[in-house]
Image (spheres, helix red, strand yellow):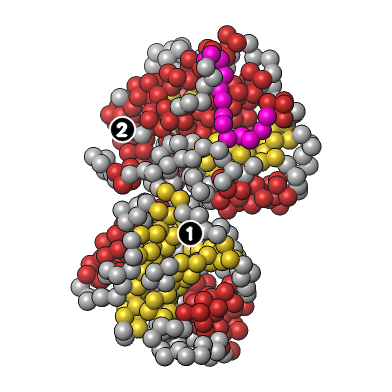
Amino acid sequence: MSFSRPSPYHRRFLLMCGIVGFIGKRAAKPVLIDGLKRLEYRGYDSAGLAVRTDRGFDVVKTTGRVASLARLAGAREIAGTLGISHTRWATHGGVSEANAHPHVSSDGKIALVHNGVIENYADIRRFLTGKGYTFSSETDTEALCNLIAYHYAKEPEPAGNNGSGNGGSRFFTAVRKTLRHVEGTYGIVAICADCPDEMIGARKGSPLILGVGKDEFIIASDVSAIVTHTSNVVYLNDDELVHVTRDRFRVTTSGEDGVEAKIDTINWKVEDAELGDFPHFMLKEIFDQPRALENAMRGRFSDDGSTAKFGGLNMTPFELRQVDRILFTACGTAWHACLVAEYMIERFARIPVEVEYASEFRYRNAPLDKNTLVFVISQSGETIDTLGALREAKRKGFRTLGITNVVGSTIARESDGGIYQHAGPEIGVASTKAFTSQILIASMLALYFGRMRDMSFSDGVAMVQAFKKTPEYVSRILESADQIQAIARQYAQMKDFLFMGRLSMFPIALEGALKLKEISYIHAEGYPAAEMKHGPIALISPECPSVFFATSGETSQKVIANIQEVKARKGPVILVRSEACDVPDGLADDT
């Protein structure tokens, strides 16, 4: 691992699908259902399970919730101790029972669950159709499942196989051969009707972990699915396969090299991933923010209280002094945190900063100065485009540092160094506490680099004192939850929103618009407040509220002028402001 300090926290990958596979001495069905329930926060449209029995595979699939799957599975006797399960977010093919996972090969030999996208599935499907394999779904996964069955059928039977499960090596070889023909990303778990004591997992671009329990193993896409059963976990790397039997496991690469698997320990408790008294995880994690911010700061200020310190950067002060440009790259919410980092570092450390979408940086061959330091931000540490940007920067010889919340994640392992957020497990689909802790860490980096250059001791002390008050300020805002909820109810029927701010409040406006879109399915746009007159002002109406972010300082009066422009066009205004920002009474409809 590249980061020097361990973190007890783990969490989801951005893909919504969830995987749980189990092999052990107890019944598989309850373990699979419980694991899927713990992955429900991801969002999904269908769910299913397959348990190997003496009759072959007992498969239950349904559209809708895991509760529906649990009812259907509960009405049937499914006594096997080896099984796989999945929650699906539709990619190839619509929402239907046929497209739900697991998929079973047309010869009935292989059952498979899969996260990711098989880019050459159409070619595979055409090839297999010519070989007599049939398809009952529109998914890319079924092509992968049938291809494993094809290679399994072609693989010679090992000498001495009596049909009691000694075909495991044959099964494993079939999976490995299949993956050599696959283009795209995958996290898979496969089981075979002929192999009652075998389960195989593999990953490339989609996270997969192995939980190591007492006389049992669980393969899952997220630690949340296994934490109630074991605290021992192996994180698979890209292009690795894990071959699990009843009493052991072995990790190899796709090139057949053996891998010395490291078993890590999950240090967070089951209660950390429970709802408690909250109705849903997003609200719980909004209220987790003060603690998350405390954790992000803990142990990261100098003894004299004048600067930040980070033990995992793996760079000397001399090396850091040579940096004359910083590139931040990320996706989605983390990209907005990068924009805040740009404002803060340029203001307090006077180092030029660029911010790139990770998905664009991978392909556009951006010219970078030789003394550029690259930061990648990803809460999960598994965001595939951000990981691709990290690898591209490393390929070009740049020092890369990660900011992530997940120990053992791919970005944590592949970065040259970095910073753990210590925000706690983030289970809500939309980032809350992880975003604010990223902003805090970005601000602490601005202090860190600033004190290395020309920031005074007294200014550094003032910033540290301000940082330490942040959790208290957030707690005070959360005390206004009822008022905020009442404002939300007033505008809940609106179909369009504008979010606006200046300087470092502009990325907050972008994030506000993103949150409203992904949680409420309401159209929203974020803009620099001054840009309103360059187009967005045409949208202002009584049916299009504007959310403004205003702080005290040189731009506060300009933001007030922008608000007055909206009010002149009868647009409702919701104002989020600092206490020090002096706003005329009655200017905003809600504050």
- What type is the residue that disc 2 sits on? Gln
Q: Which mark is residue 349?
A: none
Q: Position of residue 218 (x, y in %)?
A: 38, 62
Q: Are marks 1 and 2 in contact (CB under 8 Å)?
A: no
The front one of 144 and 514 is 144
Which residue reaches farthest top? Answer: 458
- Which residue is located at x 33 percent, y 65 percent? 215
Q: Position of residue 266 (x, y in %)?
A: 40, 47
Q: Position of residue 182 (x, y in %)?
A: 61, 71
Kind of element beneath mark 1? loop
The front one of 548 and 324 is 324
Kind of element beneath mark 2? helix
- What type is the residue that disc 1 sits on? Leu
Q: CA distance from mark 1 to mark 2?
A: 38 Å
Circle 2 sits on which residue? 485
Q: Is residue 262 above or below residue 351?
A: below
The answer to whether residue 516 is left or right of residue 238 is left
Q: Is residue 493 above or below residue 14?
A: above
Query: Where is the C terminus found, in terms of image quarters?
Result: top left
Q: Is residue 54 above or below residue 419?
A: below
- Which residue is located at x 43 percent, y 30 percent? 295
Q: Which residues are magenta?
A: 304-316
Circle 1 sits on which residue? 208
Q: Position of residue 294 (x, y in %)?
A: 42, 27
